[in-house]
Structure formats: C-alpha cells, structure tokens
Amino acid sequence: MSSFKRKLAPSTQPPPVGTRVTPRSSLLYELSTGISSLDDVLGSGQSLGSVLTILTPDPHSAWGNLLQRYYIAQGLVLDQPLCLVGETKSCRTVLEGCMWVAGVEGASGAEPVNDEEEEQSDTKESVKIAWRYEKMGRFQTTVDTKPNAKFCNTFDLTTVLPGSKIAEATANGHLNFIDVSARVNGRRRSPRDILHEIKTLINRLHETGSSTSNHAVKPLRICIPDLGGPAWGDLSGPALLQFLFALRQIVQSSLVAVLITFPPHLSSNNPRFTSGKSEHEWIQKLAYVSDGCISFNSFGADPSLASMFPSYHGLVQVYSTPSLHTLVPTSHTHSLLRGLSSPSNHAAGGGENNLGFRCTRKRFVIETLHLDVEGGVSERRTAPPISIHDDHKHGSTDQNIMEKHTDSVRSGLATVQLESPVPETTSESPAPPKSSSSFKPKKKVGFQSDRPSLYDF
C-alpha cells in the first residue's frame, strides 16, 4: 500500500437555500425565476447580485405581473425573504394573485394533472411509423420541466396561493414592503430614499445571516413591479437610469436578486415622459444600466401577428443577459433555447433562435418560434370549399367553374376545385344516348409557371 495520499481540497460549504452554483463560475450562485424556460434563456438561472429588467410593450395585457407572480411564488415555496417595492395596495394585489404548486397542502384549485395541451395521454400509445424513425426522440420546442423542489418548482395557474402562506411569511419577517407613494415630512419619497431603505434591508439581512452558518443564509428577492408608473410620481428618463445604476451597485457582491418590470408606456424604444421629453434608444440604455434586459412583445396590439402565429401569444427578444465575473454571458454557452452554443451556428455563422411565449391553462412557457403549415392552415381540409355549394345553388355551369379555376391558377394561389356533378335525368327529359364504351372524365391539372413545384388538381 502506497504511503502517499492525494491532497484534496477542503470541503466547500453548501450554497444558500434555494440556490446552486453557476455553471461557469464556482464563486457565483444563482436562483430560479420560477419558470424553467426563462431560466434557460438566462443561462441556467438568475445570478445573485444581478438586476433583471422585463419589458412588456403591449398595453392590453399584463405579462409583467404574471412574471412577477412566478418570481414571488418561487421565493415563498423556498421560504426566501421577499421585498416588494411599489405602491403597497398594488403590490398586495400582485402577491395575492400568485399561483401555487398543485398538490401542496393548502393549495386550492385543480388536481396536479398534466395539461392536455402539452402532454396528452395519447402520446404514450404506439404509432406506426417507419422503422428508421422509431428510435428518434420527439421534437421539442422548449426545455424539459422537471420539478426540482430545491431550486425550481412547477407551478399550476389553476391554483391560488394560500393565505396561510402569506401570513407565515409575514410572521417570519420574510415579507417586506417599501411604499413609494408614502410621504415623508409632507413630501413624496425620492428614489434616493427608496435606495437607502433597500440598502438598510440588505445590511440587516446580512447581519442576521453572519451569525449563522452559510447554509442557513437565504437570498433576498427584490420585486419592483411597474417601475416609473403613476405611483412613482413624475420621474424623468435620466432619473430612472440613475436609480437602476445605483441599485445595481448596491446589490453587487451580495446575496440579492432583483426583478424589475416596466409599464407599457416605458417599454418602447422612444418613450415620452410626463415632462414632454422623449428618450431616444431607451431600451439600449436600459440594457446597459441593468445586468439583463428581455422584452415580451404580445400580439394583443397586432392581430395580424396573432393570425400568423396562432400557437403563440407573443415574441421574446433578448437584449442582454447577466454576465457577472465573466466576459461571455452564461446564456451564450448554456442556453438551449437561444441556440448560440450549437456547433452548426458557429460553423455557418448563424444567429440565435427566434423565441416566442404562450400561456396555456396551467403554465407559462417560452419556446422556439416555428411557422405553421403553408397558408397558415392548421387543419386538413377534407370537404370542398363553401363556394362550390353556393355555385350549385345559383345554377352555375361547368364553364363558370372552370373560369374561376383558371383565375385562381393565374393568381398564384393553390386552390382545390371539384367538378360539378352531372344533373340527374327525369322522366320528362329524354334520356341521353348510351355510348358503347364506358367513358371516364380526365383529371384536370393546372400548372403554375411561377411556382413549378405546385400543381392544382
């Protein structure tokens, strides 16, 4: 037996509750946003000490509040401290509308059954396909949602956050509110006062955690819904940028993660403030002063896009992702949805994947964007068009039908037309002469010169 032993590194302390080590650096921890697909877009989660900005330009929807509810619910499941910054009444509305994990004690709603839109029971049945494709995996448009009770849970939108959980978090001191509409000495609180209160809360939590082991330390989640909204008063563009830059300096090198959502009128590239001034290249400035900036453009303001992409509710555009302690963001090398780490993209010089989001009955998910079948039809047509029946009712002849068929071919549209049936003979009309040989009508095929690959039957 050899007398030499390998010198092992001292055992490292476990990460804080509800976090894990980032894949690029062992010195950084990350937490989950509550949505596994959004975690994948960020790399594998949101790094502690980072500020994530969410933009929702559509004024007819409330996707920002939905993302905030996922963020808050994930913190409550893991018993992590929370701080909601904004008008207290609106913050409580967001908090009470949070979803919850189905099947957990106190959750009200449906039973934990998979959504019929995502995982149908008939997928388990065997389907007859070519033998060479039997062992191939199913085509996936998003990442797997495997529940992880220690990092990211699977939430059900049909369940509601129990009130006992809110009362428990308030009693333990894990739920804090900072009211921006409150007045101090007869004046509205300035952004500097709010930053000072956030810094005081962070220092108090660090002092509490320094007396215990590192495993007992819990990261703080700061949620700021509708930054720059009416509750914040008349803030200018430079004042908001200074607030974000100062907040980013406060949370750096600390066990704090911040999620900020902007109202629709501040989510465009050239917003106009109450003072009448507009900020050019506003989104680029937000991406610069924050660690990550992602936009969720809903189809509510553009019905044409909704008809073009019926399976999605909007598009996702990534302006920047957190890159703490590294030159290359973790999202570029570890995100499966963005596809920047694919070897084919580097070889061919391609860009990242187009991303879209949709909200089903039970969950919110980000997927890779794909076009539907040609023509935008998602169902197979097995019956003749309605125009054929209308022509028969008005006594149209074969010549009229053929003229319509010729016009459709010239217009370059792939249409299907059927010949009109032969009218039935009655006793009054003379019977047509019978031919000696049976005659079958030939199929008429229309060839499109501008599109040689298509034929019209």
Image (tube, helix red, strand yellow):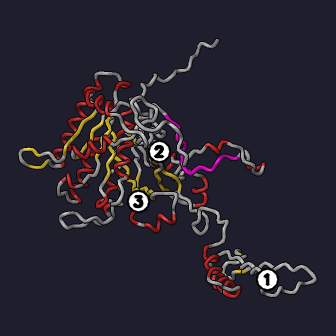
Element on which disc 1 rests: loop
Distance from Cα at disc 2 to Cα at disc 3:
21 Å
Residue receiving disc 2: 362
Residue receiving disc 1: 427
Q: Would you say 263 lies left or right of 422 here?
A: left
Is residue 66 found inside the magenta-colored segment of the image? no
Count residues near mark 1 (Cα–Cα under 10 Å), then give few for <14, some for 14-19, many for 20+: few
User: Of 1 and 196, which appears nearest the observer?
Assistant: 196
Q: Amino acid at mark 3?
A: Asn
Q: Position of residue 195 (x, y in %)?
A: 21, 44
Split into 4 quadrants, where in the image is the N terminus? top right
Residue receiving disc 3: 297
Element on which disc 3 rests: strand
Q: Amino acid at mark 2?
A: Lys
Check the image and name the residue furthest to the front.
428
Q: Would you say 392 lies left or right of 59 here?
A: right
Q: Which residues are magenta?
A: 136-147
Q: Residue at x 74, y 81 (%)?
A: 423
Pointer 2 with pointer 3, Cβ within 8 A? no
Split into 4 quadrants, where in the image is the C terminus? bottom right
Q: Earlier in the sequence, mark 3 or mark 1?
A: 3
* Residue 388 appears in the figure: yes
Is residue 137 found inside the magenta-colored segment of the image? yes
Q: Position of residue 26 (x, y in %)?
A: 45, 34
User: Of 93 and 339, which appears nearest the observer?
Assistant: 93
Q: Amino acid at mark 1?
A: Ser
Q: From the viewer's perspective, is the residue at label 3 or at label 1 nearer? A: 1
